[in-house]
Image: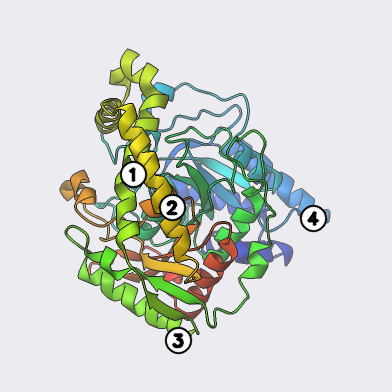
């Protein structure tokens, strides 16, 4: 197998190819860097390449596999990191001039776990500045562009992660998600991405946006690949005060289970919030429901009110906590921030303690209502987003506040949720299906996503670059 051809494989397929002697980690890493050099000038998905480190890691993986040392399916697999995961000796900028010269003296826990699994780090990926704001030309680096149409946005804030995985520049990436920042770019770039339960993956060494809402998780080409990456990074970490000390199941093994008889809640009244959801997105979603029903699942209509009500509380908490983290710098060096994130941070400074406390009180009530939903159903399904990717020249950040947000409810509640590709618009842009489940039941969420992938081929499609 030619190394260039290996770049089209999934993580699971590449792991098998290594062990069957059909591909070699050093050659695959070299092919990845060649492809990045050829394509990424149009996409801006990477802000820092770590070629020397990657080639050392690839050689080590190759030598270990040849010597019978098997670290698991990520061994020798090229990956990327959203540029808010600390990397020892490698700059970590959060896409901002504020941290342009920061070189951490230790890895984030998730970074270290990927290294321990034998992954090959190609580099640090673009993002919305400090995981906030939007695609902003005034930030330290140019915004990432959508591989399906570089004139379009990727979604955020894990924008480079979505672009690089979709463009076959890396096999998987880590993102972060505070209001939808793994699921939005997964939806708009046509890949899979999961926001795990709050506390399942350590955030130690990850630049925060909102302490009580931040989640870390994987983005990859398939649900199985997300399960492989999640297996590597999940688990208790005493260095993260919010880390949960719970058993970590075998996520990949759980994919094989049946979805026969699983009850899927559909909160349809949510879909009409504000200006509503694009008809093409709704049509793809309804077709995805038919696929899941054909595979044995049942659908149940739900009241969409508690889902829709989550957005305001999530937004206020996010804004207040983001301002609390950035207050010293936004006061002393405001011009080092891009226009978009600077304006949003200043809005957070206008909130009162009363605003924050009332939002937290609302959160308690809403979370009780959301948890009660899972007494009736095994999972909740919805579109991942109300629209396909907008063009840069027509992008309006206020649009997000006029259409439904299908992601905020699961940050506010901390429940696991993932996006999987479920179709394309007439203009050739991806559409995502969101699947959410009870706390720490990633197995069911992943199983449903995998069952959907087995019955469809959307995840096999790649942009023509």
Q: Earlier in the sequence, mark 3 or mark 2?
A: 3
Q: The C terminus appears in which quarter of the rendering?
A: bottom left
The quarter of the picture where residue 106 lies is top right
As helix, strand or loop, the secondary structure at mark 3 comes to helix
Point out which mark residue 294 bears.
3
User: Which of marks 4 and 1 precedes in the sequence?
Assistant: 4
Q: Nearer the viewer, mark 3 or mark 4?
A: 3
Residue at 22% x, 49% y is 401
Q: Position of residue 84 (x, y in %)?
A: 48, 35
Query: Mark 1 to mark 3: distance in Å?
Result: 37 Å
Disc 2 crowd rating (10 Å Cα; few below 14, some 14-19, many 20+) is many
The local secondary structure at tag 2 comes to: helix
CB under 8 Å between discs 1 and 2: no
Front one among 442 and 172: 442
The reply to whether residue 38 is visible in this rendering is no
Residue ID at (48%, 76%): 263
Labels 2, 4: front one: 2
Residue that mark 1 sits on: 313
- Label at residue 66: 4
Which disc, if any, is residue 367? 2
Q: Position of residue 432 (x, y in %)?
A: 37, 65
Marks 2 and 4 sit apart, C-alpha to C-alpha, by 50 Å
Q: Earlier in the sequence, mark 3 or mark 4?
A: 4
Which of 29 and 146 lies nearest the eye of the viewer?
Answer: 146
Neighbourhood count class around disc 4 (C-alpha, 10 Å): few under 14, some 14–19, many 20 upward = some
Q: Which one is in front, 241 or 389?
A: 241
| Residues tagged 3 and 4 counted as in contact (Cβ below 8 A) | no
Question: Residue at the spot x=60%, y=35% of the render?
Answer: 241
In the picture, measured across the screen, residue 38 lies left or right of residue 260, that is left
């Amino acid at each position: 197998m030619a190394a260039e051809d290996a770049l089209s494989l999934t993580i699971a397929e590449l792991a098998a190819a290594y062990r069957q002697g059909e591909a070699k980690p050093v050659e695959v890493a070299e092919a990845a860097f060649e492809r990045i050099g050829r394509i990424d000038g149009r996409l801006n998905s990477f802000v820092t390449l770590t070629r020397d480190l990657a080639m050392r890691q690839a050689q080590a993986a190759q030598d270990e596999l040849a010597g019978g040392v098997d670290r698991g399916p990520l061994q020798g697999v090229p990956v990327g990191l959203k540029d808010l995961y600390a990397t020892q000796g490698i700059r970590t900028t959060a896409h901002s001039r504020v941290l342009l010269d920061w070189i951490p003296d230790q890895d984030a826990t998730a970074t270290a776990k990927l290294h321990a699994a034998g992954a090959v780090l190609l580099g640090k990926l673009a993002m919305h500045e400090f995981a906030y704001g939007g695609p902003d030309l005034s930030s330290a680096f140019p915004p990432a562009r959508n591989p399906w149409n570089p004139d379009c946005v990727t979604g955020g804030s894990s924008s480079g992660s979505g672009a690089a995985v979709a463009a076959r520049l890396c096999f998987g990436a880590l993102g972060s998600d505070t209001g939808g920042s793994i699921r939005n770019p997964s939806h708009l770039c046509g890949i899979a991405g999961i926001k795990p339960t709050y506390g399942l993956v350590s955030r130690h060494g990850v630049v925060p946006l909102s302490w009580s809402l931040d989640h870390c998780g994987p983005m990859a080409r398939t649900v199985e690949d997300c399960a492989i990456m999640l297996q590597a990074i999940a688990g208790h970490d005493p260095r993260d005060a919010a880390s949960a000390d719970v058993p970590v199941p075998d996520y990949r093994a759980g994919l094989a289970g049946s979805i026969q008889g699983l009850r899927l809640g559909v909160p349809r009244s949510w879909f009409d919030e504000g200006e509503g959801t694009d008809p093409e997105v709704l049509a793809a979603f309804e077709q995805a429901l038919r696929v899941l029903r054909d595979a044995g699942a049942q659908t149940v209509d739900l009241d969409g009110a508690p889902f829709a009500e989550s957005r305001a509380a999530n937004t206020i908490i996010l804004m207040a906590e983001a301002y609390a983290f950035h207050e010293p710098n936004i006061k002393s060096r405001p011009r080092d921030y891009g226009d978009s994130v600077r304006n949003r941070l200043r809005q957070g400074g206008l909130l009162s303690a009363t605003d924050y406390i009332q939002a937290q009180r609302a959160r308690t009530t809403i979370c009780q209502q959301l948890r009660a939903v899972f007494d009736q159903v095994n999972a909740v399904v919805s579109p991942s987003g109300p629209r396909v990717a907008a063009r840069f020249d027509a992008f309006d950040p206020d649009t997000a506040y006029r259409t439904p947000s299908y992601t905020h409810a699961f940050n506010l509640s901390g429940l696991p949720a993932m996006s999987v590709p479920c179709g394309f618009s007439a203009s050739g842009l991806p559409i995502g299906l969101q699947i959410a489940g009870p706390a720490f039941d990633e197995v069911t969420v992943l199983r449903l996503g995998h069952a959907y992938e087995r019955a469809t081929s959307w995840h096999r499609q790649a942009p023509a670059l």
